Image (cartoon, rainbow, N blue to C red):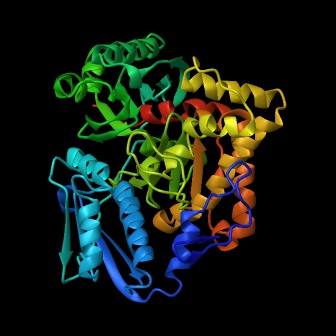
Amino acid sequence: MMHLGVNITVENRPILDEGFIPLYKWFNEYKKDASVPIAIAILRSQGQMAVHETFIHGTTSKFDADKYYLERLIKTLLWMKGGFRVYLYGVNDVLFNYIRDAFSAGGARAFDAEFMADVYEKEFEVLAVSEKPSAYEVSKPLGRHLDGCRIGFDAGGSDRKVSAVIDGIPVFSEEVVWHPKTQPDPDYHFQEIVQALKSAAAHMPRVDAIGISSAGIYIDNKTMVASLFLKVPKALYKEKVQNIYLRAAKEIADVPVVVCNDGDVSALAGGMNLNTNNVLGIAMGTSEAAGFLDKNGHITGWLNELAFAPTDAQHVAPRDEWSGDIGCGVKYFSQDAVIRLAPLAGIELGEKLTPAEKLLHVQNLLKDGSSAAASVFSTIGAYLGHTLPLYYDLYGFHNALLLGRVMSGRGGELILEAAAHILKNEYPDIAANIKPVLPDEKARRVGQSVAAASLPERM
C-alpha cells in the first residue's frame, strides 16, 4: 500500500475497513531514511514547554511526504500536550510557511489553532527559531483521597453517572441518559447536574467533598471548552457554563470541589483499579477521552484530547464533523465508530434512534450472537491494535485501561482480543512493554465516577 511515496504493509487489516493505514506505520516508514534533524516545541500555560525531536527528508522529491508528516505530527502533539505557540527549529522556509499557513485563519488546521487560542486565551502562533528550545514540564498528584462521604459525578455525552462513596466504598451509583450536546439552554445542564448530585447525597449522612469528571478542558475548575455545551450560545457561556459545576455543587453543600477532564479521571480510575501508575486511560463513549497518569502517579497538565489526534493515514478516512479533519480518533474509538461501521456490516440503524440507542442496538445484536455486530467491535479492536503503538511512542505508558460505554459487555472483550492479537503479531517489541486491560464490568461503567469522588482533599 503506497501513500505519498511511502510504502506501507498492513498484515492484519480491520475487517470492515481494509483501506485503513495506521499512522504509526506510515510515520515509521517515512522516517527510515529521513536524515534532517528538526525539533517541534509547544508552549502552554505557566511557561511549560514540550519539545519533540525528529527527522525529515528536506528534499524536493519528498516535499509532499514532509508536509504531511510535519502537519500530522504537530497536530498530534498539540492535542496531546496542548499549547498556544509552536516553535519550529531546523525546518526550511518552504515547510515553515506551509505549516504556519495551515494553522492560521482560513488554513486547513484553523480549527485546531482557534481551539487552542480559546483554551489558553492567547493568540495562536507558529514561529521559526534558530536555537532549539529547552523542555520544561511540571506534573502534580491527582486524587486517591478516599476518606469521608464523597460524591463523584461523571458527565458523559450520552449518559451521566454519579456515585456516593463512603471511605472508599461506593454505596450508591446510577446512570441516567441525558442529551447535553443538543441542548442550547444551560439551565437544562445545570438542573441535570444538580439532580445527579442530590441523588448521591441522599444515600449518605453528609457530603464532605465533590469530584467532577467531565468531557472538555478545565482550568481552575472552570469550563474553558467542552463539547457537552456545544449548542449553548456564546453570550451565555461565560455567565452560565464556565462555573456550572461549582454552582451546582453549592446547591448540595459548601465543600471542596475539583473539576477534572474525564480522560485524566479515566487514567486515575485505571491506576486505582490496577493499584499501579504509568497508565494511559482511554474512555470510549460519546467521544474518545484519554488521560495519562505518569510513573509517579501524577498528571502532566497535558490536554490528552486524542479524539482530535489522527490515527488513520488513508486519504478517504472518515471526517469529524466538528473539526472538519479526517482520520481522527473520535471516528475510531467512540460510539461514532460503531454507528459508522454498523451499516458496512449490514446492520440497519433506525433514523429516529439517538446515538446512544444505536450503540445499544448493536450491542444487543451482539448479545444475540450476531456475527455482523461482532465484526463491528473486532474492527474497532483492529484500529486500537494499530494505534496503541502510536500512543506508546508518545506517552511511554505501561498499562492501557479501556473504559466507557463502547467497552461494555462482549463488545469490549472483542475489542481487547483483536487489539492484543495485532499487537502480538505486528508489534511484538511494543506488545512486550504494554498491557491493554479491561476493568471489571462495574468499573467499566462507573469507574470514573468513583475515581472522581477521590479528587478533592477534605477541608
Residue at 28 percent across and 83 percent down: it is: 90
Location of the C terminus by quadrant is: top left
Q: Is residue 407 left or right of residue 234?
A: right
The one nearer the camera, 331 or 303, is: 331
Using the image as rendered, state which of residue 340 and residue 40 is in the foreground. 340
**Seen in the image, is 443 located left or right of residue 131?**
right
Task: Please name the residue shown 77% across and 27% down the image.
Answer: 365
Residue 452 occupies which quadrant of the picture? top left
Q: Residue at x 62, y 53 (%)?
A: 384
Q: How many marks?
A: 0
- Can residue 277 be seen here? no
In this rendering, the answer to whether 377 lies above or below 76 is: above
Residue 424 position by quadrant: bottom right
Above or below 15: residue 102: below
> Foreground: 143 or 59?
59
**Residue 254 location, x and y as percent?**
25, 20
Vertical relation: 77 (above or below) 291: below
Q: Is residue 193 visible?
A: yes
Q: Position of residue 288 (x, y in %)?
A: 50, 43
Where, quadrant-wise, is the N terminus in this rendering? bottom right
Q: Quadrant of residue 63?
A: bottom left
Is residue 436 rendered to the left or right of residue 191?
Answer: right
Q: From what the image shows, is residue 227 above or below residue 91?
A: above
Left or right: residue 5 compared with residue 69:
right
Residue 35: percent from left, percent from top: 43, 89
Query: x, y (%) of residue 150?
Result: 42, 25
